[in-house]
Amino acid sequence: MTQADPPALLSADDLDPVIALVVEGLVVAVPTDTVYGLTSLLSPRAVDRIFSAKGRPADLALPVLVGWAEQVGVVASSFTGPAAALAERYWPGPLTLVVPARARVGSLVGGSGATVGIRWPNQPLIEELCLALGPLPATSANRHGEPPCSSAAEVRERFGPSEVAAVVDGEAAGVPSTVVDCTRRRPACLREGAIRWVDIQDVLAG
């Protein structure tokens, strides 16, 4: 349903207003290399706002976006073996890797708290935000159970300004990331998206 007052539309050419909103703990929608995402600070209040805006069940943990390799260690307590091999091959890109979480991060993002999904998008805008703000919790921009948004216009139609403070104008491919659970003895595909599971299996076999 179209909102009478949609969220503000901000330019990707000037991220200072976006960063200011995130620092306030507000939710913003940003284009990624997959779909539009809802993001904010990695803090209790901001994470709660993301869950509330999306209507996401608390037992479904939020993934976390990073902007360079050194940020992985801030989020993950362990990142070796299959996770490291897949990251080497596909990051930055449309691959989310579920790995053991650092206790502080696990306690914030929902779910069991033991694991966290990490992704390094191939999107300079996201890298800039992560460089400025640190790792960012994020989820696809949609109501839980509905298709994800792939344009700023779609996000502004589905959310009001009390839920999403602003939308960064841009383009998204519209295909979600592939999600691989690397906490098991044999990595498992939790969702096949932009990268085929058969290609991931080839990397793991190599």
Image: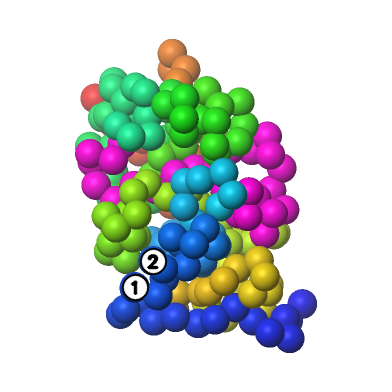
Quadrant location of the N terminus in the rendered image: bottom right
Quadrant location of the C terminus in the rendered image: top left
Is 62 within the magenta?
A: yes
Is 168 above or below relative to 67?
A: below
In the rendered image, residue 111, in percent from the top left (x then y), is placed at 62, 32
In the rendered image, residue 154, in percent from the top left (x then y), is placed at 60, 76
Seen in the image, is 57 located left or right of residue 154?
A: right
Please name the amino acid that badge 1 sits on: Leu
Question: Does residue 126 show up?
Answer: yes
Q: Residue at x 22, y 39 (%)?
A: 70
Give the label on residue 19, or none.
2
Secondary structure state at the residue bearing disc 1: loop
How many marks can you see? 2
Please name the amino acid that badge 2 sits on: Ile
Is 48 above or below relative to 37?
A: above
Residue sitting at the far top: 185
Q: Which residues are magenta?
A: 47-72
Give the label on residue 15, or none.
1
Seen in the image, is 82 located left or right of residue 164?
A: left
Circles 1 and 2 in contact, beta carbons < 8 Å: yes
Residue sitting at the far front: 24
Front-most of residues 164 and 36: 164
Front-most of residues 198 and 41: 41
Is 179 within the magenta?
A: no
Q: Residue at x 24, y 47 (%)?
A: 68
